[in-house]
Amino acid sequence: MASGDTMEILIPWNKETIQSDHGKDYIAKIPCYDGLCSIPSHIDYKSTIETFYNQYHELDYKPKAGNCTTILTFLKHIFGEQYEFGLDYLKILYENPLQALPILCLVSSERGAGKTTFLNLLKLMFGKNMTLNTNDDFRSQFNYDWANKLVIAVDEVLLDKREDSERIKNLSTARQFKAEAKGKDRQEVEFFGKFILCSNNETNFICIDNEETRYWVRKVLPFQNQLNCTSLIFFERLKAEIPAFLDFLINRPFHTENKSRMWFMPKQLETEALIKLKSNNKSLIEKEMINVLEMIFEDRDLDIIQFQLQDIIASMNNLNYRNLSISKVKEILVSKWGLSTVNSSYTKYIVFLDGTISTSPHKGRYYELSKDRFLKINY
Protein backbone atom coordinates (compact mmCIF):
# COMPACT_ATOMS: atom_id res chain seq x y z
CA MET A 1 0.00 0.00 0.00
CA ALA A 2 1.06 3.66 -0.42
CA SER A 3 1.43 3.98 3.36
CA GLY A 4 3.96 1.16 3.46
CA ASP A 5 1.57 -1.23 5.19
CA THR A 6 0.89 -4.67 3.75
CA MET A 7 -2.47 -6.23 2.97
CA GLU A 8 -3.24 -9.94 2.87
CA ILE A 9 -5.61 -11.07 0.10
CA LEU A 10 -6.61 -14.63 -0.82
CA ILE A 11 -6.10 -15.17 -4.55
CA PRO A 12 -7.07 -18.51 -6.16
CA TRP A 13 -4.30 -20.29 -8.05
CA ASN A 14 -4.77 -23.40 -10.14
CA LYS A 15 -2.61 -26.47 -9.69
CA GLU A 16 -0.74 -26.02 -12.96
CA THR A 17 0.35 -22.46 -12.06
CA ILE A 18 1.64 -23.55 -8.65
CA GLN A 19 3.61 -26.42 -10.18
CA SER A 20 5.01 -24.12 -12.86
CA ASP A 21 6.22 -21.58 -10.28
CA HIS A 22 7.32 -23.89 -7.45
CA GLY A 23 7.66 -27.41 -8.82
CA LYS A 24 5.59 -30.59 -8.41
CA ASP A 25 6.85 -31.37 -4.91
CA TYR A 26 5.53 -28.07 -3.55
CA ILE A 27 1.89 -29.23 -3.84
CA ALA A 28 2.36 -31.75 -1.02
CA LYS A 29 3.41 -28.96 1.37
CA ILE A 30 0.18 -26.98 0.94
CA PRO A 31 -2.37 -27.63 3.72
CA CYS A 32 -5.78 -28.93 2.64
CA TYR A 33 -9.14 -27.97 4.11
CA ASP A 34 -12.65 -29.36 3.84
CA GLY A 35 -14.06 -25.90 3.30
CA LEU A 36 -14.29 -22.31 4.48
CA CYS A 37 -15.84 -20.87 7.64
CA SER A 38 -15.96 -17.48 9.30
CA ILE A 39 -15.66 -17.58 13.10
CA PRO A 40 -15.00 -14.16 14.65
CA SER A 41 -12.64 -14.01 17.61
CA HIS A 42 -10.03 -11.48 18.70
CA ILE A 43 -8.74 -12.73 22.03
CA ASP A 44 -8.53 -16.44 21.14
CA TYR A 45 -8.16 -16.33 17.37
CA LYS A 46 -7.75 -19.56 15.38
CA SER A 47 -6.94 -19.60 11.66
CA THR A 48 -8.19 -23.19 11.41
CA ILE A 49 -11.43 -24.46 12.93
CA GLU A 50 -11.24 -28.25 12.93
CA THR A 51 -10.77 -29.03 9.21
CA PHE A 52 -12.01 -25.67 7.91
CA TYR A 53 -10.08 -22.55 6.98
CA ASN A 54 -11.25 -19.51 8.96
CA GLN A 55 -11.89 -16.54 6.66
CA TYR A 56 -12.11 -14.21 9.64
CA HIS A 57 -8.81 -12.36 9.98
CA GLU A 58 -6.49 -12.07 12.94
CA LEU A 59 -6.12 -8.49 14.18
CA ASP A 60 -2.92 -6.59 13.45
CA TYR A 61 -2.74 -5.12 16.97
CA LYS A 62 -2.34 -6.98 20.25
CA PRO A 63 -3.23 -5.58 23.71
CA LYS A 64 -0.30 -4.01 25.51
CA ALA A 65 -0.31 -1.93 28.68
CA GLY A 66 0.31 1.74 28.02
CA ASN A 67 -1.18 5.19 27.63
CA CYS A 68 -4.28 5.72 25.45
CA THR A 69 -5.26 9.23 26.56
CA THR A 70 -5.61 10.55 23.00
CA ILE A 71 -8.05 7.79 22.01
CA LEU A 72 -10.10 8.20 25.18
CA THR A 73 -10.27 11.99 24.69
CA PHE A 74 -11.37 11.47 21.10
CA LEU A 75 -14.04 8.92 22.08
CA LYS A 76 -15.34 11.30 24.76
CA HIS A 77 -15.78 13.84 21.97
CA ILE A 78 -17.63 11.32 19.77
CA PHE A 79 -19.93 9.87 22.44
CA GLY A 80 -20.31 12.90 24.73
CA GLU A 81 -22.61 12.23 27.69
CA GLN A 82 -22.89 8.60 26.48
CA TYR A 83 -19.13 8.09 26.73
CA GLU A 84 -19.39 4.99 28.94
CA PHE A 85 -21.95 3.46 26.55
CA GLY A 86 -19.51 4.08 23.72
CA LEU A 87 -16.73 2.28 25.57
CA ASP A 88 -19.09 -0.63 26.28
CA TYR A 89 -19.99 -0.76 22.57
CA LEU A 90 -16.31 -1.04 21.60
CA LYS A 91 -15.58 -3.53 24.38
CA ILE A 92 -18.40 -5.77 23.10
CA LEU A 93 -17.08 -5.48 19.52
CA TYR A 94 -13.67 -6.61 20.69
CA GLU A 95 -14.55 -9.24 23.31
CA ASN A 96 -17.86 -10.63 22.05
CA PRO A 97 -18.15 -10.07 18.28
CA LEU A 98 -21.22 -12.32 17.98
CA GLN A 99 -23.32 -10.05 20.24
CA ALA A 100 -25.87 -8.00 18.26
CA LEU A 101 -25.45 -4.24 18.68
CA PRO A 102 -27.55 -1.19 17.74
CA ILE A 103 -27.03 0.57 14.41
CA LEU A 104 -24.67 3.39 15.37
CA CYS A 105 -25.25 6.61 13.41
CA LEU A 106 -22.92 9.60 13.70
CA VAL A 107 -24.35 12.77 12.17
CA SER A 108 -23.10 16.33 11.83
CA SER A 109 -23.76 19.01 9.24
CA GLU A 110 -20.47 20.68 10.20
CA ARG A 111 -16.99 19.77 9.06
CA GLY A 112 -14.19 18.68 11.38
CA ALA A 113 -16.45 16.67 13.69
CA GLY A 114 -14.33 13.53 13.47
CA LYS A 115 -16.86 11.06 12.03
CA THR A 116 -14.51 9.78 9.33
CA THR A 117 -11.59 9.74 11.78
CA PHE A 118 -13.67 7.47 14.03
CA LEU A 119 -14.28 5.06 11.14
CA ASN A 120 -10.59 5.09 10.24
CA LEU A 121 -9.67 4.33 13.86
CA LEU A 122 -12.01 1.32 13.88
CA LYS A 123 -10.59 0.21 10.54
CA LEU A 124 -7.11 0.13 12.10
CA MET A 125 -8.41 -1.76 15.14
CA PHE A 126 -10.39 -4.42 13.28
CA GLY A 127 -8.38 -4.44 10.07
CA LYS A 128 -9.71 -6.65 7.28
CA ASN A 129 -12.74 -7.53 9.41
CA MET A 130 -14.19 -4.09 8.74
CA THR A 131 -15.29 -2.62 5.42
CA LEU A 132 -15.99 0.96 4.38
CA ASN A 133 -18.88 0.91 1.91
CA THR A 134 -20.70 3.41 -0.27
CA ASN A 135 -24.47 3.68 -0.60
CA ASP A 136 -24.28 1.75 -3.88
CA ASP A 137 -22.23 -1.02 -2.28
CA PHE A 138 -24.92 -1.57 0.31
CA ARG A 139 -27.73 -1.54 -2.26
CA SER A 140 -25.95 -3.89 -4.67
CA GLN A 141 -27.23 -7.46 -4.95
CA PHE A 142 -23.61 -8.62 -4.88
CA ASN A 143 -22.81 -8.53 -1.19
CA TYR A 144 -20.32 -11.33 -0.64
CA ASP A 145 -17.46 -8.87 -0.04
CA TRP A 146 -19.06 -7.63 3.19
CA ALA A 147 -21.15 -10.64 4.21
CA ASN A 148 -18.54 -11.92 6.70
CA LYS A 149 -17.31 -8.58 8.06
CA LEU A 150 -17.66 -7.60 11.70
CA VAL A 151 -18.12 -3.87 11.03
CA ILE A 152 -19.92 -2.56 7.93
CA ALA A 153 -19.55 1.21 7.79
CA VAL A 154 -21.15 3.55 5.29
CA ASP A 155 -19.70 7.07 5.12
CA GLU A 156 -21.73 9.95 3.64
CA VAL A 157 -24.74 7.68 3.91
CA LEU A 158 -28.03 8.45 2.17
CA LEU A 159 -30.25 5.38 2.38
CA ASP A 160 -33.53 7.27 2.15
CA LYS A 161 -35.64 4.54 0.57
CA ARG A 162 -37.94 2.51 2.79
CA GLU A 163 -36.44 -0.76 1.48
CA ASP A 164 -32.97 0.46 2.53
CA SER A 165 -34.00 0.99 6.14
CA GLU A 166 -35.94 -2.28 6.26
CA ARG A 167 -32.94 -4.19 4.98
CA ILE A 168 -30.44 -2.63 7.35
CA LYS A 169 -32.59 -3.00 10.47
CA ASN A 170 -33.40 -6.64 9.64
CA LEU A 171 -29.73 -7.41 9.10
CA SER A 172 -28.81 -5.77 12.41
CA THR A 173 -30.46 -8.65 14.29
CA ALA A 174 -30.15 -11.41 11.68
CA ARG A 175 -28.18 -14.57 12.37
CA GLN A 176 -28.26 -15.87 8.81
CA PHE A 177 -27.73 -14.00 5.55
CA LYS A 178 -27.85 -14.91 1.86
CA ALA A 179 -24.54 -13.83 0.36
CA GLU A 180 -24.09 -13.48 -3.39
CA ALA A 181 -20.99 -12.98 -5.50
CA LYS A 182 -20.84 -12.25 -9.22
CA GLY A 183 -21.16 -15.41 -11.28
CA LYS A 184 -21.92 -17.59 -8.25
CA ASP A 185 -25.06 -18.94 -6.61
CA ARG A 186 -26.34 -17.32 -3.45
CA GLN A 187 -25.40 -19.13 -0.28
CA GLU A 188 -26.62 -18.79 3.26
CA VAL A 189 -23.92 -17.74 5.72
CA GLU A 190 -23.84 -16.85 9.40
CA PHE A 191 -24.09 -13.08 9.78
CA PHE A 192 -22.61 -11.11 12.67
CA GLY A 193 -22.10 -7.70 11.04
CA LYS A 194 -22.56 -4.41 12.93
CA PHE A 195 -23.57 -1.30 10.99
CA ILE A 196 -22.10 2.15 11.51
CA LEU A 197 -23.54 5.00 9.44
CA CYS A 198 -22.06 8.49 9.12
CA SER A 199 -23.82 11.41 7.47
CA ASN A 200 -23.71 15.18 7.04
CA ASN A 201 -27.51 15.06 6.75
CA GLU A 202 -28.97 15.15 10.26
CA THR A 203 -32.65 14.91 9.41
CA ASN A 204 -33.40 12.32 6.73
CA PHE A 205 -30.37 10.21 5.82
CA ILE A 206 -32.45 7.08 6.51
CA CYS A 207 -36.14 6.26 7.03
CA ILE A 208 -37.03 5.08 10.52
CA ASP A 209 -40.37 4.72 12.29
CA ASN A 210 -41.33 6.19 15.65
CA GLU A 211 -41.41 2.77 17.28
CA GLU A 212 -38.00 1.74 15.94
CA THR A 213 -35.51 0.80 18.69
CA ARG A 214 -32.52 -0.45 16.72
CA TYR A 215 -30.82 2.89 16.01
CA TRP A 216 -28.35 4.85 18.13
CA VAL A 217 -28.06 8.31 16.61
CA ARG A 218 -25.48 10.79 17.89
CA LYS A 219 -24.88 14.34 16.72
CA VAL A 220 -21.14 15.02 16.77
CA LEU A 221 -19.97 18.60 17.21
CA PRO A 222 -16.79 20.07 15.68
CA PHE A 223 -13.69 19.10 17.63
CA GLN A 224 -12.81 21.89 20.05
CA ASN A 225 -9.08 21.46 20.37
CA GLN A 226 -5.91 23.11 19.20
CA LEU A 227 -5.07 19.90 17.36
CA ASN A 228 -7.43 19.18 14.47
CA CYS A 229 -8.90 15.68 14.84
CA THR A 230 -8.71 15.29 11.05
CA SER A 231 -4.95 16.01 10.91
CA LEU A 232 -2.38 13.33 10.12
CA ILE A 233 -0.46 14.06 13.34
CA PHE A 234 -3.57 13.42 15.44
CA PHE A 235 -4.35 10.21 13.56
CA GLU A 236 -0.80 8.92 14.05
CA ARG A 237 -1.24 9.45 17.80
CA LEU A 238 -4.46 7.43 17.71
CA LYS A 239 -2.75 4.68 15.74
CA ALA A 240 0.15 4.44 18.20
CA GLU A 241 -2.23 4.05 21.14
CA ILE A 242 -4.32 1.16 19.76
CA PRO A 243 -2.48 -1.63 21.67
CA ALA A 244 -2.88 0.29 24.94
CA PHE A 245 -6.55 0.96 24.18
CA LEU A 246 -7.24 -2.74 23.56
CA ASP A 247 -5.58 -3.51 26.89
CA PHE A 248 -7.74 -0.80 28.49
CA LEU A 249 -10.91 -2.35 27.05
CA ILE A 250 -10.05 -5.82 28.33
CA ASN A 251 -9.37 -4.60 31.86
CA ARG A 252 -12.24 -2.12 32.03
CA PRO A 253 -15.46 -3.54 33.58
CA PHE A 254 -18.75 -3.04 31.76
CA HIS A 255 -20.70 0.08 32.67
CA THR A 256 -23.99 -1.44 31.42
CA GLU A 257 -25.63 -4.86 31.58
CA ASN A 258 -26.90 -7.02 28.75
CA LYS A 259 -30.65 -6.41 29.00
CA SER A 260 -31.87 -6.69 25.40
CA ARG A 261 -31.10 -8.51 22.16
CA MET A 262 -28.87 -5.54 21.22
CA TRP A 263 -27.38 -5.29 24.74
CA PHE A 264 -28.54 -1.71 25.42
CA MET A 265 -32.08 -0.74 26.38
CA PRO A 266 -33.72 1.66 23.89
CA LYS A 267 -34.15 4.31 26.60
CA GLN A 268 -30.38 4.33 27.21
CA LEU A 269 -29.69 5.25 23.59
CA GLU A 270 -32.37 7.92 23.25
CA THR A 271 -30.87 11.20 22.02
CA GLU A 272 -32.08 14.53 20.65
CA ALA A 273 -30.58 13.53 17.30
CA LEU A 274 -32.72 10.36 17.24
CA ILE A 275 -35.87 12.32 18.11
CA LYS A 276 -35.07 14.84 15.37
CA LEU A 277 -34.53 12.08 12.82
CA LYS A 278 -37.81 10.36 13.70
CA SER A 279 -39.72 13.63 13.56
CA ASN A 280 -38.40 14.55 10.13
CA ASN A 281 -39.19 11.12 8.73
CA LYS A 282 -42.92 11.90 8.77
CA SER A 283 -44.55 12.70 5.45
CA LEU A 284 -46.46 15.97 5.04
CA ILE A 285 -49.81 14.18 5.05
CA GLU A 286 -48.94 12.40 8.32
CA LYS A 287 -47.97 15.72 9.90
CA GLU A 288 -51.34 17.16 8.81
CA MET A 289 -53.21 14.18 10.32
CA ILE A 290 -51.29 14.66 13.57
CA ASN A 291 -52.20 18.36 13.58
CA VAL A 292 -55.93 17.57 13.29
CA LEU A 293 -55.85 15.03 16.11
CA GLU A 294 -53.72 17.29 18.30
CA MET A 295 -56.30 20.08 17.96
CA ILE A 296 -59.06 17.72 19.13
CA PHE A 297 -57.02 16.28 22.03
CA GLU A 298 -56.10 19.75 23.31
CA ASP A 299 -59.47 21.43 22.73
CA ARG A 300 -61.53 18.71 24.43
CA ASP A 301 -58.90 17.51 26.92
CA LEU A 302 -59.44 13.89 25.91
CA ASP A 303 -57.58 10.73 26.89
CA ILE A 304 -58.97 8.79 23.91
CA ILE A 305 -60.19 9.86 20.47
CA GLN A 306 -62.50 7.71 18.38
CA PHE A 307 -62.89 8.59 14.71
CA GLN A 308 -63.78 7.18 11.32
CA LEU A 309 -61.64 7.61 8.23
CA GLN A 310 -64.26 10.00 6.84
CA ASP A 311 -64.07 12.17 9.99
CA ILE A 312 -60.36 12.90 9.68
CA ILE A 313 -60.73 13.38 5.90
CA ALA A 314 -63.54 15.93 6.51
CA SER A 315 -61.42 17.84 9.03
CA MET A 316 -58.44 17.91 6.69
CA ASN A 317 -60.69 19.16 3.87
CA ASN A 318 -62.07 21.90 6.15
CA LEU A 319 -58.52 23.02 6.94
CA ASN A 320 -57.73 23.19 3.20
CA TYR A 321 -54.92 20.66 3.35
CA ARG A 322 -53.78 20.07 -0.21
CA ASN A 323 -51.89 16.81 0.22
CA LEU A 324 -55.03 14.83 0.92
CA SER A 325 -55.05 11.20 -0.21
CA ILE A 326 -57.69 8.90 1.26
CA SER A 327 -55.67 5.77 0.53
CA LYS A 328 -52.54 7.32 2.08
CA VAL A 329 -54.43 8.39 5.22
CA LYS A 330 -55.75 4.85 5.66
CA GLU A 331 -52.29 3.38 5.04
CA ILE A 332 -50.81 5.58 7.79
CA LEU A 333 -53.60 4.70 10.24
CA VAL A 334 -53.36 0.95 9.64
CA SER A 335 -49.83 0.14 8.46
CA LYS A 336 -47.78 2.80 10.23
CA TRP A 337 -49.79 3.55 13.37
CA GLY A 338 -51.12 0.00 13.74
CA LEU A 339 -54.75 1.01 14.39
CA SER A 340 -57.71 -1.29 13.78
CA THR A 341 -61.44 -0.54 13.67
CA VAL A 342 -64.16 -1.23 16.24
CA ASN A 343 -67.88 -1.32 15.42
CA SER A 344 -69.88 0.61 18.04
CA SER A 345 -71.22 4.01 19.02
CA TYR A 346 -68.75 6.87 19.43
CA THR A 347 -68.46 10.67 19.62
CA LYS A 348 -67.67 12.26 16.26
CA TYR A 349 -65.39 15.34 16.12
CA ILE A 350 -64.97 17.55 13.05
CA VAL A 351 -62.46 20.43 12.94
CA PHE A 352 -63.30 23.62 11.00
CA LEU A 353 -61.11 26.30 9.44
CA ASP A 354 -61.81 28.84 12.21
CA GLY A 355 -60.59 26.36 14.85
CA THR A 356 -64.03 25.35 16.12
CA ILE A 357 -64.77 21.66 16.62
CA SER A 358 -68.23 20.14 16.20
CA THR A 359 -69.38 17.17 18.28
CA SER A 360 -72.11 14.66 17.49
CA PRO A 361 -73.01 11.06 18.43
CA HIS A 362 -72.36 8.54 15.70
CA LYS A 363 -72.36 4.80 15.09
CA GLY A 364 -70.19 2.64 12.85
CA ARG A 365 -66.68 1.26 12.50
CA TYR A 366 -64.11 3.65 14.00
CA TYR A 367 -60.45 3.85 14.98
CA GLU A 368 -59.47 4.41 18.60
CA LEU A 369 -56.33 6.30 19.59
CA SER A 370 -55.20 6.95 23.16
CA LYS A 371 -53.35 10.11 24.09
CA ASP A 372 -50.31 8.12 25.25
CA ARG A 373 -50.13 6.33 21.89
CA PHE A 374 -50.61 9.62 20.09
CA LEU A 375 -47.72 11.22 21.98
CA LYS A 376 -45.46 8.36 20.88
CA ILE A 377 -46.59 8.82 17.27
CA ASN A 378 -45.89 12.55 17.53
CA TYR A 379 -42.54 11.90 19.23
Image (cartoon, rainbow, N blue to C red):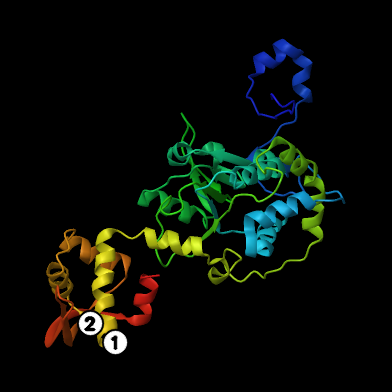
Residue 51 appearing in the image = no
Residue at the location (53% across, 67% down)? Answer: 270
The kind of secondary structure element at disc 2 is: strand
Q: Is residue 275 above or below residue 98?
A: below
The quarter of the image holding the N terminus is top right
Give the residue type that dot 2 points to.
Gln
Q: Can you tell which of label 2 and label 1 is closer to the viewer?
A: 1
Q: Quadrant of residue 2?
A: top right
Q: Is residue 146 above or below residue 288?
A: above
The kind of secondary structure element at disc 1 is: loop
Considering depth in this image, is 230 or 350 the residue closer to the camera? 230
Question: Which label belongs to residue 323?
Answer: none
What is the residue that sits farthest to the top in this orientation?
A: 20
Question: Which label belongs to residue 302?
Answer: 1
Q: Are marks 2 and 1 in contact (CB under 8 Å)?
A: no
Task: Where is residue 286? Give x, y as percent.
Answer: 27, 64
Residue at the location (34% across, 76% down)? Answer: 374
Task: Where is residue 233? Give x, y as percent.
Answer: 74, 37
Task: Where is residue 351? Give x, y as percent.
Answer: 16, 77
Task: Where is residue 252? Give x, y as percent.
Answer: 79, 62
Spatial distance from mark 2 to mark 1, Cα to Cα? 10 Å
Q: Is residue 130 left or right of residue 135?
A: right
Residue 119 appearing in the image = yes
Q: Is residue 271 left or right of residue 164?
A: right
- Which residue position holds label 2? 306
The quarter of the image holding the C terminus is bottom left
Within 10 Å of disc 2 (Cα), the crowding (few <14, some 14-19, many 20+) is: some
Considering depth in this image, is 243 or 48 the residue closer to the camera? 243
Q: Is residue 115 above or below residue 31?
A: below
Q: Quadrant of residue 317?
A: bottom left
Within 10 Å of disc 1 (Cα), the crowding (few <14, some 14-19, many 20+) is: few
Give the residue type that dot 1 points to.
Leu
